[in-house]
Image (tube, helix red, strand yellow):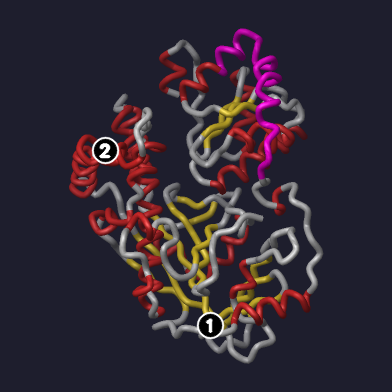
Amino acid sequence: DIILTNNGFRCINLGIKQPLANILAAVQEHGADAVGMSGLLVKSTVVMRENLEEMTRETLKVPVILGGAALTRAYVEDDCAKAYGSGQVAYARDAFDGLGLMNKVVAGTFDAEMAERKPATKRKHRTLDHATGAAPIRPIDVEEVRLNRAELQKGVSVPEPPFWGPRVIEHVPVKALLPYLNDNMLYQFHWGYKKNGKKLDEFLNWARKDLRPILVDLVRESEEEKIFAPQAVYGYFKAAGEGNDLVLFDEDGTREVCRFALPRQAKAGGVCIADFVRDIGDEERDVIGLQVVTVGQHASEVAREWFAEDRYQDYVRLHGLGVELAEAMAEYVHTTIRAELGFAHQDARQMHDLLKQGYRGSRYSFGYPACPNLADQVPMLDLLQASRIGIELSDEWQLHPEQSTSAIVLHHPQARYFNV
């Protein structure tokens, strides 16, 4: 918005988490020459592709420019382009790339630019998930799945949680989250500082001297003004796997209270989240954690105020800090879960290793390949009673406040991130 406006373009900024109906109405009302969408989280890219499919049904033919930290050029210019009937979809690495693309739209050379880019994107890559589009679905052999699950459970005991059901964490000081903050993501992807040829260690050493003081000042201001309100609801639930379904039960382990249908890797021997809990036919139920965290709505409101006051650099920094604090809060709660289940002593000693899954088990956020269905957050939030900390879902199943995340937490030692 800032870069384009300063270069003579008129931008209609609809804000975050806009339903497609609002986007289409704005295109018609203002006669837009192009549509831009940005996504910081993988779950946003799911909505982007769904939007493009609906725009095709509405016979919209304006160029679409997509960007944001969650996207890659290959995903945009192959998967997303296929979802949009006109194929006029381009990836913008940053705001200046977007400016260059808009100049081509005005000059009438956008289509030629896309034709030149396409050969470069014909590379080997994976689609986001079969639930939203294209990965072949391998029919499951229920008996094979049951046997594989039994093999995975050998030697793995079920930990005893300190309580069943949900519990609220009313407040966590921002300073308590700083050890879990991903500095590299904050500085490079949110604040826009590039390595410029430096090695990562060199860049981070420079950032500690030049950027860390800025971060410390912003944290101090945010605490004084109470900009962030980190809260969470998390809890423990009895669980079992049935085929590709993760089934949750009441405290007695007899009554089903929720069921998540999850994707399985298409390859032979491919895994599914449901493989990492005990089979529904076993005598003993397993345990999983559910969590939802937020840094509150006020942070987004203050960021918008700063933007309206032309405090663009402050806006970018505050917004980026909010996104990474939400991720840090997720790490904080996950660490709490591991401690309460009795295996936090297995965590990596260095924080940068911890942030690379240097711990037992795994955390799977909705909208990512292993559990792509955002609608599954509906029963999850009901189970957690997440409204107690002000978390709601939009019509497109996006979490509100914006800087919030949700996840399934598994304790199994072999549970790791995987693509589908």
User: Does 124 lie within the magenta span?
Assistant: yes
Percent position of residue 414, x then y: 54, 70
Is 250 displayed left or right of 261 in the figure? left
- Mark closer to the chain start, 2 or 1: 1
Label at residue 207:
2
Q: Which mark is residue 156?
A: 1
Name which residue type carries label 2. Ala
Tell me which segment is drawn in magenta: 101-125
Is residue 418 in the magenta section?
A: no
Numbered disc 1: secondary structure = loop
Look at label 1 and name its amino acid: Val
Residue 420 location, x and y as percent?
66, 55
Give the Cα separation between the discs numbered 2 and 1: 42 Å
Q: Residue at x 41, y 79 (%)?
A: 341
Q: Quadrant of the N terminus?
A: top left
Residue at horizontal 35%, vertical 60%? 231
- Tag 2 near tag 1, CB within 8 Å: no
Is 420 placed above or below 62 here?
Answer: below
Residue 113 occupies which quadrant of the picture?
Answer: top right
Graded by Cα atoms within 10 Å as few (under 14), some (14 to 19) or many (20 or more), the crowding at tag 2 reads some
Instruction: Give the answer, above or below, for where 395 lies relative to 358.
Output: above
